[in-house]
Image (cartoon, rainbow, N blue to C red):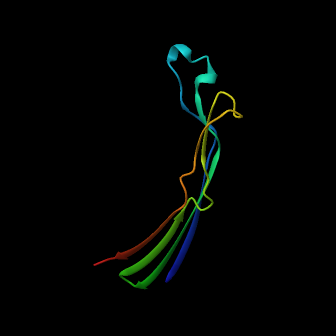
Amino acid sequence: KKFGASITYNYTAENIRNAPNIALINTPSRSQFLMPRELYNATMRYTLRPNLTLSFGVQNLFNAPQKYYRGVSDQLQTFLMQGTTITGGIEGRF
C-alpha cells in the first residue's frame, strides 16, 4: 500500500446565514441566504519508506463560488471566488 488517493464531496444546501433583528423576523427580504454549494477535494499519498510519506492535495477542485442573496434568489448580494488551494506535504514518523 505505497499509494493512496481519496476524493471527498461536500454538499451544503441553501441556508440562512444571518437573520435581522428579532422584531423584523417576518421580513425575509432582510435575511441573508447562502445558495447551495458543492465542493470536491482530492488527496494523494505516497509512502517512500514506512516512516516517510509524501502527500498532495487539491481543495475546491472545481473552484465553486459562494453566492449570497437577500430575500429572492435572483437578487444576488455577494459572489465570492475563493479559488482552488493546492497543498503538498512530507510526513515523518520517528
Residue at the image position 68 percent from the left and 32 percent from the top: 75
Determine the residue located farthest toward the top in the rendered image.
23
| 9 lies above or below 48 | above
> Can you give x and y, in whole percent of width and height, for residue 14 in the image?
64, 39
Find residue 18 and report its horizontal and vertical position in percent.
52, 30
Question: Residue sitting at 53 percent across and 52 percent down?
Answer: 82
For residue 89, above or below residue 18: below
Total labels: the figure holds 0
Query: In this rendering, is residue 59 above or below 33?
Result: below
The answer to whether residue 30 is above or below residue 63 is: above
Quadrant in the picture for the C terminus: bottom left
Residue at the spot x=64%, y=40% of the render? 35
Between 7 and 79, the one lying in front of the other is: 79
Locate residue 52 relative to residue 14 in the image: left or right. Answer: left
Q: Nearer the viewer, residue 86 or 51?
A: 86
Q: Quadrant of residue 34?
A: top right
Query: x%, y% of residue 57?
Result: 50, 68
The location of residue 48, given as percent across then percent down, is 42, 85
Q: For the point 38% across and 76% down, which residue is it?
A: 90
Q: Nearer the viewer, residue 93 or 72?
A: 72
- In this view, the residue farthest toward the left is 94
Q: Quadrant of residue 16?
A: top right
Identify the image quadrant of residue 8.
bottom right
What residue occupies the far right of the structure in this picture?
74
